[in-house]
Image (spheres, rainbow, N blue to C red):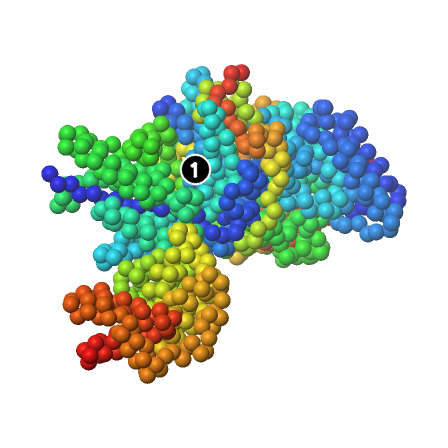
Amino acid sequence: MSKIKYIQNLMETKQISCVELTEKYLNSIEKQNAVLNAYVNVTGLEALKTAKAVDEKIAQGQKLMPLEGIPMSLKDNISTKNIETTCCSKMLKGYYPIFDATVWEILKKQNSVLLGKTNMDEFAMGSSCETSCFGVTLNPVNTEYVAGGSSGGAAASVAGNMAVFGLGSDTGGSIRQPAGFCGLVGFKPTYGTVSRYGVVAYASSLDQVGSITDSVEDASIVYDSLSVYDPKDSTSVGSKISTRDKLNNSIKGLKIGIADEFFEGIQEDIKKSIQDAIKVYEESGAEIIHFEMPKLKTILPVYFIISCAEASSNLGRFDGIRYGYKTNSYRDINEMICKTRSEGFGKEVKRRIMLGTYVLSSGYYDAYYKKAQNLRGSIIQDFKNIFEKCDVILTPSVPVTAFRKGEALRDPIETYMMDICTVPVNIAGLPAVSVPCGFDKGNMPVGMQIIGNSFEDYKVLNAAYQYEMKTKASDKEVLL
Amino acid sequence: MSYELVAGLETHIELSTKTKIFCQCTTEFGGEPNTHCCPICMGMPGTLPKLNKRVVEYAVKAGLATNCKIRNVSKMDRKNYVYPDLSKAYQISQFDKPICYEGYIKLSSGKNININRIHIEEDAGKLVHERGDTYIDYNRGGVPLIEIVTEPDLRSIEEVVEYIEKLRLIMKYIGVSDVKMQEGSLRCDVNISVRKKGEEKLGTRTEIKNMNSLNFIAKAMEYEFDRHVDILESGGKIEQETRRYDSDLNITESMRGKEDADDYRYFRDPDLVNIDVSEEEINRYRDSLPQLPDKKSDVFINEYGLPKDDAELLIKYKKIAEYFEEASKDIKNKKLVSNYILSQVFRRLPTDAEKEECSISIPPQYLNELISLTESKKITSSMASSALEQMLDSGKPVREFISEKDMQGIDEDALREICIRAVNENQEAVESYLGGKEKAFKSIIGYIMKETKGKADPIKSAEIVKEIIRGS
Amino acid sequence: MISKEEVLKIAKLAKLSAEDGEIEQLTLDMSKIIEYADTINASAEDEIVEFDNINSIENAFNEDIVLESYDRDEILKNREGGENGYFVVRKSLRG
């Protein structure tokens, strides 16, 4: 059930004021954030100011906009004018953008209440928030485990009842994986439907902004507000199809594609949860269609090459001259730049920059980057063919459930392999949502992923919503 | 041992769009440092570029005016390198699919200098060095440029200078740039190599940068040619490198201190989309181009009968050429018009800049009227000359200075009377003339012109005077 | 297997410096990852599908209309106002 709708109803019927609501969330943050470390920056004064304005509007009997008065969080790679935006990197500590990201501008206009900026892996490179310069974010479901990454803070803010919704970014699974780990709904829209302007770039052709919520309807409400064409973003298309009014569409006859390749090597209990979910769909009249995805394993190195290449170029601008960290001793400009970058960036970021530089360098460009882009073209074609036969595809979100701190960083390849289900979605620019579908042996949440064809975000959310309705979660108690 | 010079040119031209290439900051020249900037041209994290439509238009026009093929689908690429004046640490440019390719500019010798490509790119900011510290102004960052690259077809300094002048003139004519070398809106880098005459293989080339006048380009090339020859003659090897021209010492020096052979790691910019120019659009741009200098020159010389030098002088300044065309509408003897412009009018526009501006005090229609009257013999050429001076002084048309009555001229009988008088009053001159002194004749005519206040037709008068003298 | 020299060359291009201790590990890590990246070459060349941009958008343009630039104070805000309106990089700095 939609927390956003529920809360707005409470406010409109004057059962709670926006200021009271905001204070409750700020208290919740104060009580828990020291342990969970979801927020790296709490903007209490800002939040209360907005809440007050909303209360005035309600007092005048005005109708609320879809996201008005809703306490929310923004991942710290989303530019917020005059509010520190660090990407959780030493490189941008103390950096105050002079402009707003378009997605924040949209929410600002709707008087959404910004509670603060959330923790992430440094420059969004990672899957556990362990590369953040502010430390790891713990999982509110069980603090022995991590919340995931790179939008770990966003997920923990919602799972820990410290925000109604959080915006994150997803380049290879950074919204869907933490949502899955924390038992939440994480939605990554079709590439180009939500503006990237103002979101610090990791890999430009893969990044998308999305939401983490505790219900599908809330994801839908957020998406419908954000999916506007942005003239400042050349890759922006926006979406003319609203998703909220289609959530209740019948899924009878819905063709759901399943491929064995996505299930190889995943935890047994995860497999079981997904299989149970498939049964729910079958009982609702959906049709299961089996297809093959032989190229699945190559998608990861393709992703890796493209994302590192683009990142190495996007991060070139951090040289200490115009903003951000600057080394405090050097003998000449070149040394200044090298030292600034080496001191300002963490190990994982430096590694990816090195790799990106390598795959683009003369002599290697054809073998790596060019080849990867060509493979990308053929993967996109493969998906097009699959969507001729299926409406949506169902896969696990992640091969594992939340892991403990320190487990992830052992072997780089193994860590990257965890993105095997989520990465193909970014490669092809498709919409995908992670929906909670059970628990593992240790009672940690399991997420299943529903992938749709380009610009069929409404189908993805519809399928997810129907599952949600038929199982429980619709009556999750709204803790305030 | 005779050596031949081989050169190719890379010319950067600043387009005269109102706004920068990827944002809407002004491109206005000057301005206090960092006052024409925004998050996009500053490359602040999260910002995205968006291409200025007019940049594509100007680039296509530049290509069409230089006989290039236009690529229907082109893209933008990132050229990655780190330098303080480059705010994103990459320059957005075009690598393997430039918007224009395979064109040429024809020199007066009839030889074509082939153009390999024209591509679109953004300019970087400006660095100022003071006592070792570096100061950076990003106003120029993001200003749109086109880069025009020739094949190594140039064989002499004269050819290089002519190519640049022709290129400049074409760009001025089509209005895509004000191509001012001193202001930096036209920058040329020269690639130069030498080889023994008759040899087919190209020698090792060096690139010379930092020459901001044609004069410096010529001097730098001379120096570099000699340097290459000296090295080869003494058995040495030319090192492929970039060199900087020092105008004070008139030498070129190695820039080896700068980044050596940067690997630019070009790849398509994922933040930008394809540029699609349809055949229809290309045709529209082609139709909108004004008559180009070479064609105009052709018309002036072959159709209007102007001497080559005169035509060249008129065409050198687009506005003057247009003024001339307006002023010579329906005039039979267009040389007359150009004579007046090149003499009396030009005297009022002593500098090049003034000629470029063509701020003549009278509109071309006034000059047209004056010359019409001269052609129809309503006024004499000396009347016209002095009237023109008055017109240029005041900005007023001819009828302010020559009345209807004056235009009637002098009838033959009245003229004959004046001529007889002239001969009688100037007996000494007549005798001098008969004695062989041609000059003396002129003084008789001068007397007639004075008496008639310039209204007499000097040719007619001379005829009559000769008649009288012969007769007497 | 990538060599230490290549790693240093890449670091130079990327404007990163690595302490001597780090280079060994970095070389090992990079070798492993590049080996993994090499697996794309195992994939058959059957179909090379040209890829330019995801949604095949073209011609996203701005009009040539001037918008007011940002205040210089804002532009220089993250560098404490700069110096006389310029960004400065001192010749050298002693920590």
Q: Residue furthest left?
A: B1
Q: Nearer the viewer, residue A477 or A158?
A: A158
Near-viewer residue (A261 or B144): B144
**Residue C94's x, y, as percent?**
51, 16
Decide if residue A11 is on the left or right side of residue B136: right
Foreground of the two, B401 or B226: B401
Residue A45: x percent and y percent?
A: 77, 33
Q: Residue at x 76, y 42 (%)?
A: A70
Which residue sits furthest bottom? B413
Residue at horizontal 72 percent and vertical 47 percent from the top:
A109
Circle count: 1
Return the residue at label 1. Answer: B80
Q: Is residue B85 visible?
A: yes
Residue at 51% from the left image edge and 36% from the top image edge: B137
- Chain where mark 1 sits: B
* Crowd class of label 1 (few under 14; some 14 to 19; many from 20; radius 10 Å): many
Residue at x 67%, y 42% (from the top left corner): A104
The quarter of the picture where residue A121 lies is: top right
Q: Is residue B75 visible?
A: no
Question: Does dot 1 land on a helix, a strand or a loop?
Answer: strand
> Where does the image place residue A74, in percent across and percent down from the top left?
67, 37
| C78 versus A245 height, above or below | above
Task: Determine whether, in the image, residue B244 is placed left or right of residue B323.
Answer: left
Residue A286 image-quadrant placement: bottom right
Quadrant where the image shows the C terminus of chain A: top right
What amino acid type is highlighted by mark number 1?
A: Asn
Q: Position of residue B444 (x, y in %)?
A: 27, 69
